[in-house]
């Protein structure tokens, strides 16, 4: 089975952005040391334009070959005129309102979201599936999430967008890798205890 991994940037108090979802306050923590980590461990999680700007768009995918994001997260790329933000991955966008995909590289998944995710997980071979967010989609897919990779930056929002916008059942996860950085960021990996 391929894993569905919720890989997400988060504040110390567990928010993925401010109340509007704006996560830009966390961006300054992507400094040289952190970017080196992303390049060596998770290059495919950086959008294609960012990879180009940083000069590593030729790096091979290491952990993921597929990305799924919610329509509101995809909207942020669309507002920048970017219809295919993760061109180096197979891209799925969850939406019941988008009638047609703005790009042939992006597949829209509506009512059949859960079935599609289960089918992707059941596919043989390949790399894992990057659940990019946001909060609502992660809440909807909570039971299917096999792994969390939480990039915690040393800021407190006080209030904001939670990791999961849904009433999830309590679920246990086992701590895997932990990596800390000079600027106070910590990246923790958790596998669901099934
Ligand atoms: N900190 C981070 O690393 C990070 C990462 C990603 C995103 N974010 C933030 O998250 C915010 C967006 O999160 P959000 O929770 O507001 O929205 P979201 O999860 O990105 O998108 C929600 C939309 O996804 C679609 N959707 C959700 N569940 C579905 C289902 N079961 N079937 C079909 N479609 C489904 C719906 O689209 P329709 O309305 O079209 O039906 C829904 O309105 C952004 O502001 C972004 O900055 C932060």
Image (cartoon, rainbow, N blue to C red):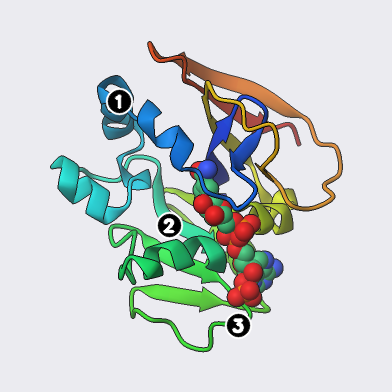
Q: Secondary structure at mark 3?
A: loop
| Above or below 100: residue 188 | above
Q: Residue at x 46, y 16 (%)?
A: 179
Q: Is residue 159 visible?
A: yes
Q: Residues within 10 Å of mark 3 (few under 14, many from 20)?
A: few
Q: State whether residue 87 is above or below residue 38.
A: below
**Other-residue count near label 1 (Cα within 10 Å), few / some / many at <14 / 14–19 / ≥20:** few
Give coordinates of residue 99: x percent, y percent: 53, 88
In this view, the residue in front, 20 or 180, is: 20
Cα distance between the residues tagged 2 and 1: 26 Å
Q: Helix, strand, or loop for circle 2? A: strand
The residue labelled by disc 2 is 66
User: Does label 3 point to a residue whose CB lies under 8 Å from ligand 1?
Assistant: yes
Q: Within 8 Å of ligand 1, the CB of disc 2?
A: no
Of residues 26 and 62, the one drawn nearer to the viewer in this rendering: 26
Query: Is 164 placed above or below 15 here?
Result: below
């Amino acid at each position: 089975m391929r894993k569905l991994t919720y890989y997400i940037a988060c504040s110390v108090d567990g928010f993925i952005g401010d109340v509007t979802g704006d996560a830009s306050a966390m961006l300054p923590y992507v400094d040289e040391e952190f970017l080196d980590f992303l390049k060596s461990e998770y290059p495919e999680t950086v959008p294609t334009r960012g990879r180009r700007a940083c000069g590593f768009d030729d790096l091979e995918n290491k952990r993921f070959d597929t990305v799924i994001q919610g329509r509101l997260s995809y909207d942020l790329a669309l507002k920048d005129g970017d219809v295919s933000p993760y061109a180096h991955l197979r891209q799925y966008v969850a939406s019941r309102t988008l009638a047609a995909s703005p790009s042939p590289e992006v597949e829209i998944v509506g009512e059949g979201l859960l079935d599609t995710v289960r089918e992707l997980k059941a596919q043989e071979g390949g790399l894992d599936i990057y659940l990019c967010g946001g909060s609502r989609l992660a809440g909807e897919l909570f039971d299917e999430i096999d792994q969390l990779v939480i990039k915690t930056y040393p800021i407190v929002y006080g209030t904001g967008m939670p990791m999961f916008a849904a009433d999830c059942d309590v679920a246990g996860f086992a701590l895997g890798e932990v990596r800390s950085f000079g600027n106070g960021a910590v990246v923790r990996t958790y596998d669901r205890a099934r």
